[in-house]
Image (cartoon, rainbow, N blue to C red):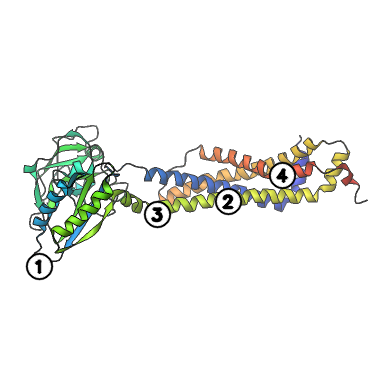
Amino acid sequence: MELRPILSALMRSRVALVLLGLQIALTLAIVCNSLFIISERAALMERPSGMNEADTFVLSSIGFGADFNLKNAIAEDVNMMRSLPGVVDAAPINSVPLSNGGWSSGLSLSREQKTASAYSTMYFTDDHGLETLGARIVAGRNYRPDELGERNRKTAGWPPGIIITKALGEKLWPGQDPIGKTVWLDTEADASTIIGIVDRLQAPWVHSEELIEHATILPQVIIEGAFTRYIVRAAPGQRDAVMKAAEAKMVELNPSRIVREGKTIEKFRADAYADDRAMMIILGTVIVSLLIITALGIVGMASFWVTQRTKQIGTRRALGATRGAILRYFLAENFVITTLGLVLGTALAYGFNVWLIQNYETQTMPWYYVPVGCLSLWMLGQLAVLGPARRASRVPPAMATRSV
């Protein structure tokens, strides 16, 4: 089929051609970048935290009685929790991955450094902390009970031995084994030696790319004020029952405090990524809406053209054009319009991605998004125009003379 008659017909409807082409171009640009953002958010949400999320929960309490003693309460609580049926382990801890709150600090490789070599989340717990979290030691060892200490305003020193994540070790000593190396958590204090490496343990702040895989686990229990937090890991399938039992036992054990309702790590994850999930839903709705509107635009424009050209179609049929030839004509015409829109849309898609990189620090969109988007819109355009094209192919030859 020759393109000349198609282009000649389209030039007689320039406004419609421009509007439909722009609609297709904007659809391609928005859909490709939206799909890329959705895939980025999905990958972000699927990152492993490095801990056992399915069986773990957090409990916390705030003492208010005049005779409330935080140190004694922590000792009583952890002993009680570890003895409960269905509990794998329990430990006091200042924060947990995905909780969006905690303590971070810089680490330096020498006392003289003015700027930190890396920044890390600080998890303060005891020798049961790693087992409770489900973090896997890949080098070195866990803490011994005799290495545990307390931390408050009066005893603010750093421990002589610490455990860090593999990612943090690679950041501090690229390509080297961190075990036995020293690091300064405070240039005014003594250095700490790396005694263990865990495979992964995320930071509480899920959107902090600098900190997300950098964690330091310290053998210190925070004894400060009246607030404390516990992490408890239950046997598989027993988490909810254990959480209720532990909460009730805490209230019974010491009534001079408020025990906050337990919260699962899965709930922490859902809350941490609530905004990302909402964004994905919104963008998904935008994508579906744009595709539907574009398809309806193609259907409407093609139907209008079929109505306007009924006599011309009848004339072609009277001169011997088959129904298949009429069908192919409208499919080819829509293919030309879609192609022109996609050429412009390709430039817009990459330009929009560059703008997102410059203003929102997103990643570069993979090259295949636009070709796949073009192919999808070509198919959508052909499907959308198929109905009007089939209606045009059924115009009888007699229509050429009906108005005479």
Q: CA distance from mark 1 to mark 2?
A: 63 Å
- Mark 4 vs mark 1, foreground winner is 1
- Mark 3 vs mark 1, foreground winner is 1
Q: Which residue is mark 2?
A: 290
- Mark closer to the chain start, 1 or 2: 1
Q: Residues within 10 Å of mark 1 (few under 14, many from 20)?
A: few
Q: CA distance from mark 2 to mark 4?
A: 20 Å
Q: Which residue is mark 4?
A: 387
Residue at the farthest right position: 404
Q: Which residue is mark 1?
A: 66
- Mark closer to the chain start, 2 or 4: 2
Q: CA distance from mark 2 to mark 3?
A: 22 Å
- Mark closer to the chain start, 3 or 4: 3
Q: CA distance from mark 4 to mark 1?
A: 80 Å
Residue closer to the observer: 316 or 228: 228
Q: Are marks 2 and 4 in contact (CB under 8 Å)?
A: no
Q: CA distance from mark 3 to mark 4?
A: 41 Å
Name the residue rendered at 9%, 60% in the picture.
69
Q: Residues within 10 Å of mark 2 (few under 14, many from 20)?
A: some
Amino acid type at mark 3: Asp
Query: From the viewer's perspective, is 215 left or right of 23?
Result: left
Amino acid type at mark 1: Ala
- Mark closer to the chain start, 2 or 3: 3
Q: Position of residue 43 (x, y in %)?
A: 39, 42
Amino acid type at mark 4: Gly
Task: Tell me the quarter of the picture where residue 249 sits.
Answer: bottom left
Q: Residues within 10 Å of mark 3 (few under 14, many from 20)?
A: few
- Mark 2 vs mark 4, foreground winner is 4
